[in-house]
Image: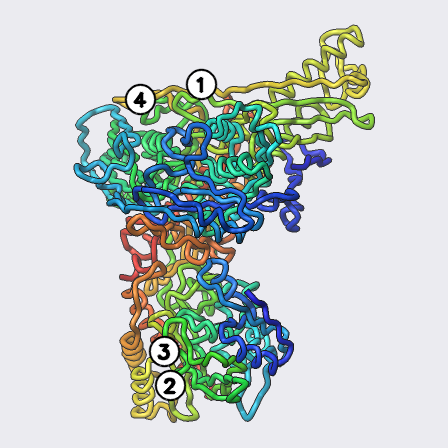
Amino acid sequence: MTSTETRTTGKIGDSPLRPDGTLKVTGEFAYSSDLWHDDMCWGVTLRSPHPHARIHGIDVSAALALPGVHAVLTHADVPGLNRVGLEHLDQPALAEDVVRYQGEPVALVAADHPETARRAAKRIVVDYEELPALTDPRRALDEGVPQVQPGGNLVRELTIRRGDPAPQAPVVVALDFEVGMQDQAFLGPESGLAVPDGEGGLDLYVATQWLHVDQQQVCRVLDLPPDRARLHLAGVGGAFGGREDLSIHVHACLLALHTGKPVKMSYARDESFFGHVHRHPAWLRYEFGASEEGRLAYAKADILFDGGAYASSTTAVVGNGGTLGLGPYNIPSVTVDARGVYTNNPPCGAMRGFGCVQAAFAHEALMDELADRVGVDRVEIRALNGMRDGDLNITGQLIDSAAPVAELIRTVRDLPLPASPEGERDIRDLPGGASNTTHGEGVVRGIGYAVTYKNVGFSEGFDDYSTARVRLELTGGEPVATVHTAAAEVGQGLITVEQQICRTELGVDRVVVHPKNTFVGSGGSTSASRQTYVTGGAVKAACEAVRAAVLRLASARLGVGGLRLDGDKIVSASGEVLASLADVLGAEAVEETVEWHHRPTEEIDPETGQGNAHVQYAFSAHRAVVDVDVELGLVKVVALDTAQDVGKAINPDAVVGQIQGGSAQGMGLALMEEIVVTDGKVRNPSFTDYLIPTILDMPPMQVKVLEYADPHAPYGVRGVGEPPTISSGPAVAAAIRAATGKALRRVPVRPEHITL
Amino acid sequence: MDFLAPSTWAEALAAKAERPDALPVAGGTDVMVEMNFDHRRPGALLDLTRVAPLGEWAFDDGRVRLGAGVTYARVIAELGSTLPGLAMASRTVGSPQIRNRGTVGGNLGAASPAGDSHPALLAADAVVEVESAARGVRHVPVADFYTGVKRNALEQDELISAVLIAPPSGPQQFCKIGTRNAMVIAVSAFGFALHPDRRAVGTGIGSAAPTPRRATDAAAFLAGELEAAGLWESRAALPEGLAAEFGRKVRDAAAPIDDVRGTAAYRLHTLSVMARRAATWAWDEHRRAA
C-alpha cells in the first residue's frame, strides 16, 4: 500500500537490488496478513466437514447471539450471482443446497476478535445429509457413480490425432505413471482487508495474482459495478498459481458491506490447505514407438487429471497437459487423449508448470526406458529426438525460435559432477542427515536427466494482454518516471523489471513503481511465466510512446526534427547534443497508457487437436545426482544442475533465483510434497506433515543460462518461472531409479516404494 | 483461560495442586501447536519458564540431573559427550528455533510416541523425577513413565522436575527415520546403549507403538550372545549375523500402525535396519575404545 521508490543505475541486463528485498530479509515487509485498520472486524469461514453432503438448513442464531459478533452470513445474503470460477462459473461463493468437497465455504462470521469469530462459527448448526462421494477420478466417467456437477463429471476432454492413425514401430515401450497432489505451499496465508466507503462500495486490499479478474468475480457476486469495488494489491507471500482463484475476496467484501466496517480475513495454515486449489493429481499411460536407433516414430498418451469438485482452471490444465504432454520431441504420429474430471476431492487448478509437470514425469521416464531398450545413451536419445527451430510440434505448430533441446541436455551432462564420496563422511551429507541412519551403509549414487518445454503466456485463442501507464516529469529538477501497472508482484521481481525497462527506454535513473491497483487497465495474470514478456512488453511500449511524445515536445521547442533520446540527452540526427531531458520537460508531465497484446494464438481443432495453440515455448534441462540409502529408502540429492534458455535475462540474478526456486519445488514433488487425500478428506493439512524441502534437502546448483533471443518477444525474452519446476522433478526421479534399479512409477517417491 | 506464572518451584507445585486442569508449558513447541490447532483448550496454562532451577543441570550422586526446562540446544552444546545418545536425539529435533525452545521435560510431559528424546532415555535407563506439593518427590523409571498414547504417569498435582541419567559406560547411538533430511517428525526411531559395566544392552523404540517402549527381549538376546561368546572381555568382532538377528528381534518388539507419515510395514523394516546398524556402530566404537 506504499509506493516503492529506489534509485539505482540498473537497466536491462543488470541485476539491481529489488526494492522489496531488504524489507523481506529483515522482516519489515508488510504482507497481506499484516493489514490493519482501526475498528476493523475479523472474518472467519465455516467450511464443510464432508466431501459430499446435502444441506437441509443452516441455523445461525446461536452464533449471532454471541457478544462481539457483528454478522453471520450464508448464501442467502449474497446480493448478486452466487457463482465464482476462473473458467466455469460453477462454484458458489457460499454453499447453497449441496457441498461438494471437504472445506467448501458454507457460512461467514464477522466479530470484533478473531477468537470470538471462530467460536461463533462453531455455534452455527448446519443440517447435513451425507451423500455418497466420488473420490476415485478413474471412475468419474463410469455409469452409476455420484454426479458431482449438474452437467456430469467431465470438465474437458482433449484429443490430438496427427500422422499415421495406426503407426507401427520395431521398438515399443510403455508405462503407467501416477502423480500425487502437490500444494503451492506459499508461506503467506490467504489474507486481505475489505474497507467499505460508506456509499455502498468498497476497497479490497488482497494478496492475489490478477487484480482485474478478481474484481470481475467480486463485482458479479456483490452486484456492484467495477468502480464501486476497487482492488489493491497487498503484500504477496508467494503464489505459484494458488492465488489465481478467489479465497477471502468475496467473503471479506460481503462481511464489510453487511457490517459497514472494515473486515480483515487471514487464514491459519491448516485453513490455507482448504482455501486454495492444488496441483492436479494425474494418472498417465504412455507408449512410444521408435526405430532400432531410438528415433521416435509415434507416441500415445492417455492422461487423466483429477479436477476435484469445481473446475477452476482444469480446462486449461488439460489443454497444456494434452498439447505439451509428450515433451520437446519430434514425433511424426501422435495420439493423445487428455481428460479432466470432477470428483468430490479438493478442487485442483493452477500451479507452476500447469499440466506439464505431471506429463513430464511420464515422458521422461519413458524416454529413459526407450534409451535403455535401444542401447542409446540417455542424454543422446534426447538430443536425437529433441525439437529444433523450424520443427513442427504435435499440434502442428511451427517452432519459430530457438529450441535448443540437444544443447541443453548436453550442457547439463557436461557440467562438473560432484566428487565421489571417499572415506568417512559427515552424516549431514548422507541420506537421513543428522538423523544418523547411515554412515555410508546401503548408499548408492544415481544420476538422472530430464528435459522439458512449456508454453509462455495464455494460450488457445485467449486475448492475452497487459496495460502500462508511464509518466515522465521533473521532480526536484530531475526526470522521474512513474510506472503504473496492475500486474501482480508475487515475489518474482516484476517491479524491478518494470524499473529496469523504464531506465533503459527513457534514460532516467529514478523510477517510481506506482502501487498496483485497478485504477489502471488489466495487467493480466501473474502466471504462465508471462509477466516479463507481456507486462514487460506493455511497459516498453508505454515508454516508447512517452519517448515519442517527449521528442515531439523537443522538436516543437527546438524547432528541429529527427531527434532521438540518448541516455537523458536529446540528440540531433547528426549526433549533436541539443538539450537535456530535463530542459525539454520543464513543467510538463508526459503520460501515456498502452495496452499491449502478444501474438494471437488459436483454439485447437476439437477433433485433431491441431492448431497454433501457444505463443512461445521455453526449454530447460536438469541433471540430478542423488545418494540413496537403498535399505531405508532415504534420499539425499547431492546435485541438481540445470541449463535453461531464457531468451534474454532482463535481470540475471532474478532469473537464477527463479530457476533455483522452481527447481526446489519440482524436486519437492519428486521426493516428498503430497496432500494425502483419503475418501475425499485431507489427512495432512499442516507443514508438520505436508513436507517441503529444507535447506538440508536442496543441494547447491550449477545454473547455465542460455540467451537465444526470441525475435517475436520484447527484448527477445522467454518466460523463466515454470520450466525449472517441470524438468527438475523427473531428473530426480530418474536418478533415484538409477540408484535403486526400481521402476518407481509414482511420485512423490516414498521411502517404502524403494524398500518394500 | 488463565495464565499462571509462578517464579519458584514451590509456587509452581502449589499452583498445580490448586489447578489440576492447568497445562504446564515450557518451550511451548508442543503445547502452542496443540492450542493453535484447537486440539486442546486447558483451563489454565502453567508457565514454568520463570522457575530458574528447572533450567539447570548438574552431576548428582554420579548421575546427571537434567532440569526439566533444559533445552535441546543446551543438551547438544553442554552435554554432547556426557550424554551422547540424548544429544544425538536432540540434534534431530525440529529446527534450530525449536531446539532453542523445546525441552526434554516437555517431551516427557507430552509423552508422544514420536517424541525424539524417548528412545535415548529408554536406552540409557533414565529416571524421571516428579514432585507434588502434597507427597513430595518420587522417581519413576522412564520405561514406566509412558502409560498410553500421549499419556504419562504423572498424577494431576505433579510436575516433572528433572530427568536423572547415568553417564554411559559404553557407546550410545540414536537413529531416526524421516521423509526429509531435517525438521521432520519421526516415522520411526531407535535408541541404543551398550552398558559394558553391567554387561547389558539398552534399547528404545520410537514412533512404532502406542508408547515409546523398549525391545526387552532383543536387548537380553544381544547381551546374552555377547556374554556367551566372551565378547565383553575379548571385544572381538561381532559374529556374522548377530546384529541382523538383533535387528529382527527389535522389529518384533514394535507394534506400529499405518498413518500419513508411513506404513506399519515400513516402520518395522526400518527398525530392523536401524537396530542392526546402531548395534554395529556401537560395538565397533566399543572395540576402538579398548
What type is the residue that disc 4 sits on?
A: Gln
Left or right of A726 in this view: B61: right
What secondary structure is found at the residue carrying circle 1? loop
- Total labels: the figure holds 4
Q: Residue at x 58, y 78 (%)?
A: B12
Which chain does the residue under circle 1 lie in?
Answer: A
What type is the residue that disc 1 sits on?
A: Pro
Left or right of A232 in this view: B261: left
Residue with the mark numbered 1: A600
What type is the residue that disc 2 sits on?
A: Val
Residue with the mark numbered 4: A610
Query: Residue A141: horizontal and vertical position, in percent?
Result: 22, 36
Q: Quadrant of residue A348?
A: top left
Vertical comparison of B46 with A522: above or below: below
Q: CA distance from mark 4 to mark 1?
A: 16 Å
Q: Residue at x 54, y 78 (%)?
A: B18
Choose mark 1 or mark 3, whichever is in front.
Answer: 3
The answer to whether the residues at label 2 and label 1 have Cβ atoms under 8 Å apart is no
Number of other residues with Cα within 10 Å of mark 2, as a class: few under 14, some 14 to 19, many 20 or more: many
Which chain does the residue under circle 3 lie in?
Answer: B
Vertical comparison of A430 with A509: above or below: below
